[in-house]
Image: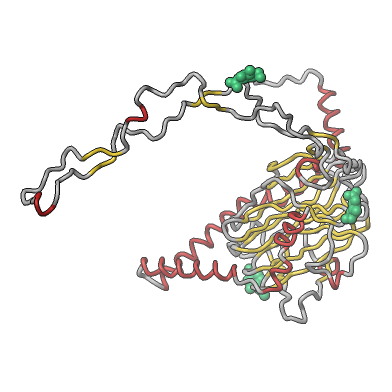
């Protein structure tokens, strides 16, 4: 279909508006991990005295679309990672909040997080760790076959609330952009690689507030409420002679044995078998109850405990962004962290970074995989053996994932958070 531009001025007006829109984007924090990033980020001492604090590697990774575009990557297995950066405190009241970053799991992650957090108020960054309260936790989390999801945890009134909708995350070994958009009308959108994956309302997709309506606790089922869907047919009658049908009959195929001696063995009687005519005690057939009034449900009433909060979406003192993770297998690389009020700006940044590099990164990854496979067959020319070894390795990895140290369990946000969630 041809688009005819009736008024060329209209087109330039749109252009100007677009420029204005992007010119007015407020960027609260943007980190591309260029030179000097170490001055902006504070590595926490959390878990250092237990020798469980992992080192970050400043790198573009084993495969990438631009070797000069570096990020920070977890580099030691079985380690905790905690790092954060500060920005001028702001409130998202009356504004859209966009939180976005790129993450790549080069290690074929089988158990570990790839999420980031926004923190509020005053935080001792040197002590930032799993127990530090946060405002928003967002990003992918993978563990075994069951957990492959995007977390979106919002802290409201001191309690962490998980999103109630399932949002699957990416599971390959390539870079992906995760975006969380929170709007002043209390709606949100989650995007991966600039594609919308989930959206809705803070009211329906989190249990931040008590429910607006509840079942009336005073309501009782009326005496004459008929909740039997089927009833015995009053018209149905027992057929004549029904009760005379015996349960068992003598086996018509049985024959008196040749050597049966009536004098010694007594009178021969055929053994009995179940009577195929016998259908059990008579029951009238069931029909639909013409008086059926449906299943009784208590009517809903307004919940006296519900108090709306017009600032449900507001985080008034956002001040830090942090990564706090436990990793069984390291290799997760973060880049292009952005906090802004403009979804368009975030989209453009994603296109300029991830979008521009993704094809080259994919090609580099495929090349690396080919090399790895060649190495493997060189080491072990008998193919079937090589496969067996792979299987053994996989099995080993899985049990590794299960054998998290106890400390790790404690910091496992998912467990902790869902426990909290269940208590509600
Ligand atoms: C950092 O990453 C690069 C690229 O993957 C790798 O060659 C190097 O060994 C890594 N360094 C550490 C200390 O892990
Ligand atoms: C906030 O939490 C406190 C303590 O749990 C509770 O008493 C209060 O009702 C909550 N307020 C809101 C608005 O949810
Ligand atoms: C249906 O309700 C009417 C009125 O209460 C009653 O007379 C009738 O027997 C009921 N029918 C059945 C099948 O229960």
Residue 315 can be seen, yes or no: no
The percent coordinates of residue 143 (x first, y second) are 62, 60
- As drawn, is 345 to the left or to the right of 393? right
Residue most extreme to the left? 258
Residue 201 visible (yes or no)? yes
Picture quarter with the N terminus? top right
Q: In which quarter of the image is residue 321?
A: bottom right
| Percent coordinates x, y for residue 254 in the rendering | 15, 42
Relative to 55, say whether 225 is above or below. Answer: above
Q: Horizontal placement of 396 versus 136: left or right?
A: left
Q: Which residue lies at the image location 77% right of the left edge and 51% below the top edge?
A: 100
- Could you tell me which residue is drawn at 83 percent across and 69 percent down? 128
Q: Where is residue 264 in the image (x, y as percent from the top left)?
A: 10, 54
- Residue at screen point 85% across, 23% down: 9
Q: Which is nearer the eye, 188 or 241?
A: 241
Q: Residue 389 placed where, x, y %?
A: 43, 70
The residue at 31%/35% (across/down) is: 246
Q: Judge by depth and name the residue closer to the eye, 281 or 186.
A: 281
Left or right: 417 in relation to 64: right
View quadrant of ligand 1: bottom right
């Amino acid at each position: 279909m041809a688009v005819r531009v009736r008024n060329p001025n209209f087109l330039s007006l749109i252009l100007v508006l677009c420029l204005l829109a992007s010119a007015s984007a407020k960027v609260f924090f943007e980190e591309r991990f260029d030179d000097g990033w170490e001055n902006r980020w504070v590595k926490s001492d959390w878990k250092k005295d237990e020798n469980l604090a992992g080192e970050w590697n400043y790198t573009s990774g084993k495969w990438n679309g631009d070797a000069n575009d570096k990020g920070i990557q977890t580099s030691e297995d079985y380690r905790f990672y905690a790092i954060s950066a500060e920005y001028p405190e702001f409130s998202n009241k009356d504004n859209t909040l966009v939180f976005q970053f790129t993450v790549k799991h080069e290690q074929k992650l089988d158990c570990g997080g790839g999420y980031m957090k926004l923190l509020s108020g005053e935080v001792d960054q040197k002590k930032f760790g799993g127990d530090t309260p946060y405002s928003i936790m967002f990003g992918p989390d993978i563990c075994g076959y069951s957990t492959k999801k995007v977390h979106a945890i919002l802290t409201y009134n001191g309690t962490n609330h998980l999103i109630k909708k399932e949002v699957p995350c990416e599971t390959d070994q390539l870079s992906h952009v995760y975006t969380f958009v929170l709007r002043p009308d209390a709606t949100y959108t989650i995007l991966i690689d600039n594609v919308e994956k989930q959206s809705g309302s803070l009211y329906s997709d989190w249990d931040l507030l008590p429910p607006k309506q509840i079942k009336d606790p005073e309501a009782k089922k009326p005496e004459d409420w008929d909740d039997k869907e089927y009833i015995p047919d009053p018209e149905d009658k027992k057929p004549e002679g029904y009760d005379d049908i015996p349960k068992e009959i003598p086996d018509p195929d049985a024959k008196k044995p040749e050597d049966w001696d009536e004098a010694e063995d007594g009178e021969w009687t055929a053994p009995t078998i179940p009577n195929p005519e016998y259908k059990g005690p008579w029951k009238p057939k069931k029909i639909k109850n013409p008086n059926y009034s449906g299943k009784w449900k208590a009517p809903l009433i307004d919940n006296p405990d519900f108090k709306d909060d017009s600032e449900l979406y507001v985080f008034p003192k956002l001040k830090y962004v942090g990564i706090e993770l436990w990793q069984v297998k390291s290799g997760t690389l973060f880049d292009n962290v952005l906090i802004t009020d403009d979804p368009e700006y975030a989209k453009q940044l994603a296109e300029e970074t991830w979008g521009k590099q993704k094809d080259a990164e994919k090609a580099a990854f495929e090349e690396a995989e080919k090399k790895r496979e060649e190495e493997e067959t060189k080491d072990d020319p008998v193919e079937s053996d090589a496969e067996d070894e792979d299987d053994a390795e996989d099995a080993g990895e899985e049990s590794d994932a299960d054998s998290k140290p106890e400390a790790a369990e404690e910091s496992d946000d998912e467990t902790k958070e869902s426990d909290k969630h269940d208590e509600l």
